[in-house]
Image (cartoon, rainbow, N blue to C red):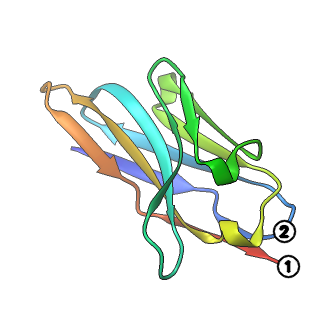
């Protein structure tokens, strides 16, 4: 079983920065893709950014140039550096990790979510 623990959310003024972290633990053999999603009130969950095992990245158009996703493979951790935050970035942010367990079973786990609130 694989667990994800997120941290780093909070309240920030527009234009400010936050850095989210998500650490995976458990019976992990290898982690492939890691990503961040967000869900605002009344809206569907959407992909914010993703990073492959080879460190290729993909971003939602709305965050390109402002957010940066990165990973520390030694610590099974994915980060999301968010700069130039806007009111519309307010949402619950979820990390998502997929890979293989030591029993060579595929896993696809979600974090518990961390609230990011941007104020004017």
Q: Is residue 57 above or below residue 20?
A: above
Total marks placed: 2
Question: x%, y% of residue 27?
Answer: 24, 34
State if disc 1 and disc 2 touch (CB < 8 Å). Answer: yes
Question: x%, y% of residue 29?
Answer: 27, 23
Q: Residue furthest front?
A: 61
Q: Residue furthest top?
A: 54
Give the camera-side residue of 111 and 118: 118
Left or right: where does residue 79 sit relative to residue 18?
Answer: left
Give the camera-side residue of 73 and 67: 67
Q: Is residue 45 above or below residue 20?
A: below
Using a 10 Å C-alpha cutoff, classify the residue at mark 1 as few (fewer than 14 neighbours), some (14 to 19) or many (20 or more). Answer: few
Q: Residue furthest bottom?
A: 42
Give the camera-side residue of 88 and 17: 88
Question: x%, y% of residue 34?
Answer: 44, 37
Left or right: where does residue 82 sit relative to residue 100?
Answer: right
Image quarter (top left, top right, bottom left or bottom right) of the N terminus: top left
Residue found at x 47% / y 64% = 113
Question: x%, y% of residue 120?
Answer: 85, 79
Q: Provide the residue designation for mark 2.
A: 14
CA gap, disc 2 and disc 1? 5 Å
Left or right: where does residue 47 sit relative to residue 104?
Answer: right
Q: Provide the residue designation for mark 1.
A: 120
Residue found at x 65% / y 71% = 90
Element class at badge 1: loop
């Amino acid at each position: 079983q694989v667990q994800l623990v997120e941290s780093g959310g909070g309240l920030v003024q527009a234009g400010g920065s936050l850095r989210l972290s998500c650490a995976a633990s458990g019976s992990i053999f290898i982690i492939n893709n890691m990503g961040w999603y967000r869900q605002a009130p009344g809206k569907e969950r959407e992909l914010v950014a993703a990073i492959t095992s080879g460190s290729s990245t993909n971003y939602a158009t709305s965050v390109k140039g402002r957010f940066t996703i990165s990973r520390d493979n030694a610590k099974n951790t994915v980060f999301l550096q968010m700069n130039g935050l806007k009111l519309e970035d307010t949402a619950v942010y979820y990390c998502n990790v997929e890979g293989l367990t030591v029993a060579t079973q595929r896993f696809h786990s979600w974090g518990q979510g961390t609230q990011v609130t941007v104020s004017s």
